[in-house]
Amino acid sequence: MRINCPHCGTRDRREFTWSGADVALNRPAPDAGEAAWDDYVHLRENPAGASRELWYHDPCGTFALVERDTVTHLVGDAVLAEKVAR
Amino acid sequence: MGYSGLRVIWEGLRGQTGWKPMWRDPTPKAEYDVIIIGGGGHGLSTAYYLAKMHGITNVAVLEKGYLGGGNVGRNTTIVRANYFLPGNSEFYSHSLKLWEGLEADLNYNVMHSQRGLINLFHSDGQRDAFVRRGNAMINQGDDAVLLDREGVRKYLPYLDFDNVRFPIYGGLLHPRGGTARHDAVAWGYARGADSRGVDLIQNCEVTGIDIENGVVKGVQTTRGAIRAKKVAMVTAGRSGQVAALAGMRLPVESHVLQAFVTEGLKPVIDHVVSFGMGHFYISQSDKGGLVFGGDIDFYPSYAARGNLPMKEHVMDAAMTLMPMIGKAKVLRSWGGIMDMSPDGSPIIDRTHVDGLFVNYGWNYGGFKAVPASGYAYAHLIATGAPHETAAGFRLDRFRTGQGIIDEEGTGSQHNLH
Ligand SMILES: Cc1cc2nc3c(=O)[nH]c(=O)nc-3n(C[C@H](O)[C@H](O)[C@H](O)COP(=O)(O)OP(=O)(O)OC[C@H]3O[C@@H](n4cnc5c(N)ncnc54)[C@H](O)[C@@H]3O)c2cc1C
Ligand SMILES: [Zn+2]
């Protein structure tokens, strides 16, 4: 598997650490309540197919939001996680 | 008719003409008392114990592929009771006891072999942790023996004891640990359930779960709608998708775990052995192949095949621990889809829907759990109350934070186990 880093281009999977589904970008407010936090920390779509997820590129220290298919392992576009509107 | 040594000889004498298929191939009825979704090890053992322990036989197991085609036929077959935390300890202890009587109970040779499991340690700190684990195992009534370096050498002379980075300090021996023939476990339970009247329905994918006013009414399948008073989900790596049919989001991620097997060799590895400084464990199958594996690939996957980095890690670790393995040729590798729960421990529970039950979260260790999981799930489905050995496996423990069973001590979060 080769993954796209928005800064560095396509690199070997070894350079990346998988860092969670895209739900990780939707951190609730501290007082949002138990259900919202349960949703964020535990509950998952866990899709079989198209997926959006965070990969950390270890060499450049970037979190990329990457499109990947969990059935075919086909990797698509990637954007900087910090640029993603929440 | 039962299986026996005499029967094998008798059939040999009359040209093997008397064997019958081990289970029927029934068409689904319009309604069942209980529908079990998923014909893996856990679904089949659940059906068996529903019939055997609770006399509930109007049961169907719906399997989207063929029986035993999922993880139950893809694992590395290790059976052990070396857990540490309350919640897990009593459950796996119960499971091992069921294993020990399984072949007689099922009248089926599952090739359960208690050849002993040795977990190696490579530092003083690791030794302390294993002493603690061993004591927990003994407290639970199971067996554990601390081996020093020379003790390990007696059993496993072929290891690289003086490896510069990871010298072997000793090992924790679990004499009752071992392996079993994975397919045979699925087949044995299938035959036992079928002979008690359970319908095993293959090529039947569940595509919908019918719920009215918070009560389960049945399922939609690729072979039509089937009504049921109770529905039990137990689909391992597919648990998230099946629960979604009931409008549920589960605390689950599906990851791929790989395994490897070499060409058949003469007996060389008599135990199950695990390395303490990398992800590698190994045993030798009765056919002679060295069966080994490591950790998950650490990204979600439904591909049932893994990537090169984990393969390399496993091979590196193997060569570090037992350089002789470099002479063996790897024949095959494959992957299975693991139902990873946040704390690494399973769930056997009711759901918010009346009559709908959930069983998943077996991570990479659910083969040894097949007997006790089916036993406990059948108890829950039949009586409505959790079985005492599985009382800790509650679904709401993640939301409430109460009763987390974090066996590895890494925290109760995804992607840490
Ligand atoms: C490589 C590898 C090594 C392992 N090693 C070990 C080990 O050494 N020891 C150990 O204890 N455990 C081990 N495990 C874990 C163990 O195999 C699993 O935890 C266990 O088999 C999961 O339960 P199961 O048998 O019920 O799953 P499965 O056999 O996967 O059963 C689930 C079934 O549900 C069916 N299904 C899914 N969706 C639907 C649907 N919509 N409708 C109908 N049916 C459906 C699937 O087709 C499948 O047959 C290993 C796993 C792997 C992959
Ligand atoms: Zn980069």
Image (cartoon, coloured by chain):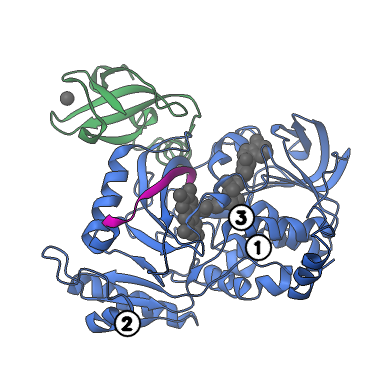
Chain colours: A green, B blue
Residue B153, above or below B53: below
Amino acid type of the residue tagged 2 in the rendering? Leu
What is the chain identity of the residue bearing mark 3?
B
In space, the residues marked 1 and 3 are separated at their CA atoms by 22 Å
| In this picture, residue B251 sits left or right of residue A15 | right
Residue B257, above or below B182: above
What is the chain identity of the residue bearing mark 1?
B
> Was residue B134 drawn as part of the magenta stretch in this picture?
no
Front position in the image: B399 or B235 = B235
Q: Is residue B363 visible?
A: no
Residue at the spot 28% in from the left edge and 56% down from the top edge = B327
Residue B120, above or below B396: below
- Residue bounds of the magenta highlight: B326-340
Residue B417, percent from left and from top: 37, 51
Residue at the spot 25% in from the left edge and 56% down from the top edge = B317
Amino acid type of the residue tagged 1 in the rendering? Ala
Disc on res. B146: 2
Main secondary-structure element of the magenta-colored stretch: strand
Task: Name the mark nearer the viewer: 3 or 2.
Answer: 3
Q: Do dots 3 and 2 share one subunit?
A: yes
Disc on res. B376: 1
Q: Residue furthest right?
A: B30
Residue at the spot 49% in from the left edge and 77% down from the top edge = B176
> Was residue B327 drawn as part of the magenta stretch in this picture?
yes
Determine the image quadrant of residue B319.
bottom left
| In this picture, residue B305 sits left or right of residue B351 | left
Amino acid type of the residue tagged 3 in the rendering? Asp
Per the image, the residue denoted by label 3 is B183
Residue at the spot 70% in from the left edge and 67% down from the top edge = B108
Disc on res. B411: none
